[in-house]
Image (cartoon, rainbow, N blue to C red):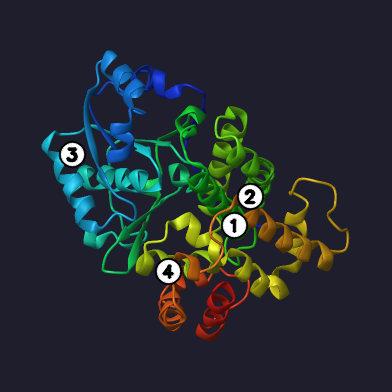
Amino acid sequence: MGFEFATVPHLIVKRGAARDLGQLLRDRYTASRLCLVTDEFLHKSGLLQPALDNLRAHGWDVTVIDDVVADPPDHVVLQAVARAREVRAEVVLGLGGGSSMDVAKLIAVLCGSTQPLSEMYGIGNVTGPRLPLILMPTTAGTGSEVTAISIVTTGETTKSGVVSPLLMADLAVLDAELTLGLPPAATAATGIDAMVHAIEAYTSARLKNPLSDMLATQAMRLLSSNILRVCRDGADIEAREAMLLGATLAGQAFSNAPVAAVHALAYPLGGHFHVPHGLSNALVMTHVLRFNLSSAQDLYAELAKTLPGEKCPLEPAAAAQYFIDQMETLVADTGIPRTLRAVGVTENDLERLAQDAMQQQRLLMNNPRPVMQADALAIYRAAF
């Protein structure tokens, strides 16, 4: 069996790492000008202040770029790049949710070379070089801290991906303390996003391999055992840390065995209705799982063994059905919206959503069962 596997060269899992961030980075870099990329809410909330204080105490000249928004448009990326160039940034730190980390990746490559953003879209088009890049997540969901992809909103309702090994960070730092303030709804949606990453990596029709399988199953064990626990008690630091590590392991898995139809059908929901990415995945997940059942039964049966409890049937068909049912129950138990109509979608929108989903061939080609436009429409109708 031949395969390739790539991930970040260094990963630190440490409670309170943000409070020691200046020293952590000083141990690795002699530079002084650091660009910290985040969003306005995190900056103003005070959550970043211990990290900022420690960075400056260890000689870092920090410029904070905090105008990142969810699903960042290309003009927001380019404005951030202009600011980083203006201060002659030497090191880039992305600290926040997936969007902040995605923008940080692009700042690092755009400030490191003269290549325009317009030439980077697609797979393997970044020429480099780039600036040193450190990523710290504040949600347990996207796995962006260990992926080689950045998603940019490039039109009214469209998103484009930049996929390149050069977007892989030099260092990912997991500090569960940074996730303690996340509200239950966001905790649930981001957690389910991470679970979808693990599920789709494990069932990917392309590039699935023993290492991605190992990471995906361990991610599912951590995530499925802790998501309801952390939704009920957001201050449970052990559950928070398990979720954060689970999301990172899932990120390492899907960065090598790519995601598929759940994401393909989720993207139009974000584009047209500005539904947060994790919630978009949750809304279509179980309906895609049911659609895939005929082609992924044995794999779903194996994933069923990663769920907590001892009720999993032994027979593969029953175990696969059990897995889908348990995932549906889990989504319901988190209390997040469960239907498309609950997030503003009307029946008249479904055809357009199905058409847009078909544009995500980069993702659909990884699905264990081929998805036609009529299939996408049927899945949206089931989710409606």
Residue 201 shows which numbered tag? 1
Q: Earlier in the sequence, mark 3 or mark 2?
A: 3
Distance Cα–Cα, label 3 vs label 2: 36 Å
Task: Farthest residue to the top: give it.
Answer: 57
Q: Position of residue 301 (x, y in %)?
A: 77, 60
Rendered-image quadrant of the C terminus: bottom right
Task: Farthest residue to the bottom: give it.
Answer: 374
Q: In the rendered picture of this protein, how many numbered marks are placed on residues? A: 4
Q: Could you tell me which residue is drawn at 40 percent across and 43 percent down? A: 97
Kindly check if marks 4 and 3 are in contact, taking CB atoms under 8 A apart as contact. no
Q: Earlier in the sequence, mark 4 or mark 3?
A: 3
Q: Earlier in the sequence, mark 3 or mark 1?
A: 3
Q: Secondary structure at mark 3?
A: helix
Q: Secondary structure at mark 4?
A: loop
Rendered-image quadrant of the N terminus: bottom right
Q: Position of residue 107 (x, y in %)?
A: 25, 44
Q: Earlier in the sequence, mark 2 or mark 4?
A: 2
**264 or 117, which lies in front?**
264
Q: Which residue is tagged 2?
A: 216
Of tags 2 and 4, which is closer to the observer? 4
Kindly check if marks 2 and 1 are in contact, taking CB atoms under 8 A apart as contact. yes
**119 or 323, which lies in front?**
323
Task: Farthest residue to the left: give it.
Answer: 86
Picture layout, residue 20 above or below residue 69: above
Distance Cα–Cα, label 2 vs label 4: 32 Å
| Residue type, numbered disc 2 | Ala
Q: Secondary structure at mark 1?
A: helix
Distance Cα–Cα, label 1 vs label 4: 30 Å
Q: Earlier in the sequence, mark 1 or mark 4?
A: 1
User: How would you rate the neighbour count of disc 4 (Cα within 10 Å): few for under 14, some for 14-19, many for 20 or more?
Assistant: few
User: How would you rate the neighbour count of disc 3 (Cα within 10 Å): few for under 14, some for 14-19, many for 20 or more?
Assistant: many
Q: Which residue is tagged 3?
A: 84
